[in-house]
Image: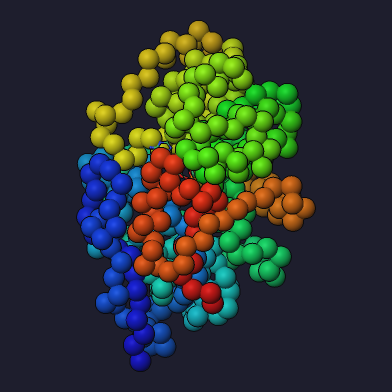
Amino acid sequence: MLTKNPRVVFAKRPGTGVPVPGEHVVFERSHSIDLDGVPLNGGFLTKTLMLSPEPFMRERMRDLCVASYSTHAVLGEPLVSFGLVVVLRSEKEGINPGDHLYGLTTWEVYTVQPYIEGRAKYNPAAAPDYTFDVDALSLQVVPDPKGAFPWSRYFTVLGAPGLTAFCGFEGCADAKPGETIYISSGASAVGIVVVQLAKAKGLKVIASAGADSKVEYMRSLGADVAFNYKTTSIVEVLKEHGPLDIYWDNVGGETFEAAIEYSRLHARLVMCGSISEYTIAPEARYGIKNTSMIFKKRLRIEGFLVPDLAPRLAPRFYAEMPALVAAGKITAKEHITEGLENGPAALADVLKEGGNEAAGKPIILVATE
Ligand SMILES: NC(=O)c1ccc[n+]([C@@H]2O[C@H](COP(=O)([O-])OP(=O)(O)OC[C@H]3O[C@@H](n4cnc5c(N)ncnc54)[C@H](OP(=O)(O)O)[C@@H]3O)[C@@H](O)[C@H]2O)c1
């Protein structure tokens, strides 16, 4: 018997700009699947419960001639992002029906895993050596299947954003109590964890976001100075509350320039992302004017990607973070949107300045079980 298998496919490369729902990213109801009979080929069949719209999905939609740290998304295929799935059938040892798994998965209700998106089109030999094969990052059984936390926590503090924050903060920031850190996109999924890790370490935290609701949220997490960069000058805030020992960059461009200007001697600038650049043409990107300050102030600028640092730091993250979350020392708010059909709009929202005004990590609830 066939069951409907709705999906969200990558329909057209956006070039520049935010992917438009219904044009670049399209919800489709036409696919079906035979849940009892579909061949598993040694893999397993999953049902998607939750999905996470994320900035890296936009990077994968870039034009084919543009190199980056991840493989390209494949036209006509479902989008791929972090998600939570439950196993329906399995031929794979160690994976059983009823298991919950978290990791990269497809924007469709039912999937035969492992999902090898566009594998035939990916040529590792032709990829720059800093490119990760997104398809090779597999799903993992959720470490705490007993329900100590709501599943949605795996999309914030206990999942990829938490791990990103932990790896960058512990691996690159070299933070010491009493220092001052500025965190841009401080209300993003990654940002809120950095805010809390920094406060727990005894730092003075300055954090910015593009909506007043997010400013309130960052304050509630302990940020000493929280401001809306759309209504308050970043330069003025850093002039008053700096200088910085650490800058956590989620944004790039003008914000990065301001952080260089108001950094102290030997400050560390941790480059986690540059979301202000993901949707604009290279020639439209902001040209930073004060790069000479980097040597004059002996600044240390370090970019990182989670897979670089995870082999060293993930064991500590999984050992320490669940206890901090259970004790209420690290928290997160989630903003849940119901229905896969609302996924394209939720993705567009995370790619806009001040988007997702409700504050809290956007999660798409596809099914309850
Ligand atoms: N290095 C790594 O391994 C790694 C891993 C994961 C994520 N990241 C990076 O970490 C950053 C945060 O990711 P996330 O998943 O936590 O994000 P998220 O929760 O999806 O939040 C994204 C937020 O970015 C802000 N934003 C969007 N467009 C912007 C623009 N043009 N200019 C300035 N701000 C803009 C918006 O908030 P406001 O405008 O309200 O601030 C938006 O809500 C991103 O840069 C991402 O690429 C890096």
> Which image quadrant: the N terminus?
bottom left
Q: Quadrant of residue 172?
A: top right
Q: Position of residue 317 (x, y in %)?
A: 66, 48
Q: Could you tell me which residue is drawn at 38 percent across and 45 percent down?
A: 351
Q: Quadrant of residue 109?
A: bottom left
Name, please, the residue furthest toward the right: 327
> Which image quadrant: the C terminus?
bottom right
Q: Nearer the viewer, residue 312 or 228?
A: 228
Q: Position of residue 212 (x, y in %)?
A: 53, 40
Q: Nearer the viewer, residue 18 or 142?
A: 18
Q: Position of residue 24 (x, y in %)?
A: 25, 55
- Relative to 233, say whether 30 is above or below: below
Q: Could you tell me which residue is drawn at 30 percent across and 75 percent down?
A: 29
Q: Nearer the viewer, residue 179 or 142?
A: 179
Q: Position of residue 271 (x, y in %)?
A: 49, 31
The answer to whether residue 241 is visible is yes
Name, please, the residue furthest toward the top: 296
- Relative to 268, say whether 323 is above or below: below
On the rendered structure, is 347 left or right of 320? left
Q: Quadrant of residue 276?
A: top left
Q: Could you tell me which residue is drawn at 46 percent across and 49 percent down?
A: 356
- Relative to 326, say whether 112 is above or below: below
Q: Could you tell me which residue is drawn at 39 percent across and 27 percent down?
A: 253
The answer to whether residue 323 is visible is no
- What colouring method underlies this structural image? rainbow
On the rendered structure, is 241 left or right of 133? right
